[in-house]
Image: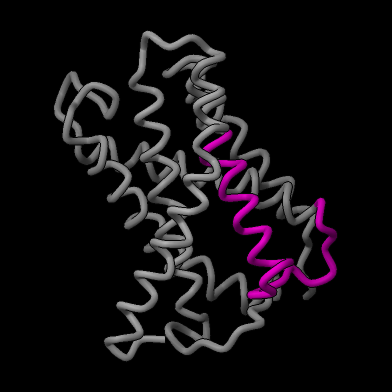
Amino acid sequence: MSPNFTVVLVGCILFTLPVVAFLRWRFGGADTLVFVVVSGLFPAVMDFLSSFALRNYEYPGQSAAWVFTYIFFGWIGTCASCMLVAEGILSHPGQDMLTQPRLWWEVPLLTTFIAVVLDLFIDPIAAAAGYWVWLVEGSAYYGIPLVNFVGWFVLMFLPPLAWIFIARQQEWTVWKKLAAAFGVLLPLAAASVLLFRTILRLLEAFGLH
């Protein structure tokens, strides 16, 4: 049975739209737009480059537009869901990640842990079913290279971190928040490359690859 990429894309979008609606209901339009930029656009660009520029993996037979759209919506839905679960676990009654001081870093850290654990189930099944094919060698987990899980860790940690910082600035206007969201994209990209390489080297030092 061959993969049905249309169903996957539609399902991804249908999952993400209610998540975005919930974010808007809870945090307002401005902070939701910021979330879309830092947790959707930024990971989508980075993951897109991983697929087409670095050739780490590919979605067989799919166009660049399909890949970007799928990654964009997929990262928003996954990141938001994991972040909200992390907040629910860590926050005290009557407080949340935008008011409780220590959660500015604890929520992003638990978010990435939840996301990586989730990917431990998703990636082997999706790869075996042919939805994506890894082009780099790896034996970390069911033939999936370590770069995948390090990438998930980085791209699920930095965007919530940036979003929480911007969303906490309640006195900022919508335009100032959006300017900040787009303004952090290059620093996020630089930080992601640095963090990715650092984690990968540390793991390789322990014989993991």
Q: Residue at x 52, y 38 (%)?
A: 38
Q: Residue at x 51, y 32 (%)?
A: 35
Q: Is residue 193 visible?
A: yes
Q: Position of residue 78 (x, y in %)?
A: 50, 47
Magenta region includes residue 61: yes
Magenta region includes residue 111: no
In the image, is 61 to the left or to the right of 16?
right
Q: Residue at x 60, y 48 (%)?
A: 74
Figure quadrant of residue 153: bottom left
93 shown above or below 185: above
In the image, is 175 to the left or to the right of 97?
right
Q: Position of residue 198 (x, y in %)?
A: 36, 69
39 shown above or below 18: below
Magenta segment range?
37-65
The N terminus lies in which quarter of the figure?
bottom right
Figure quadrant of residue 197: bottom left
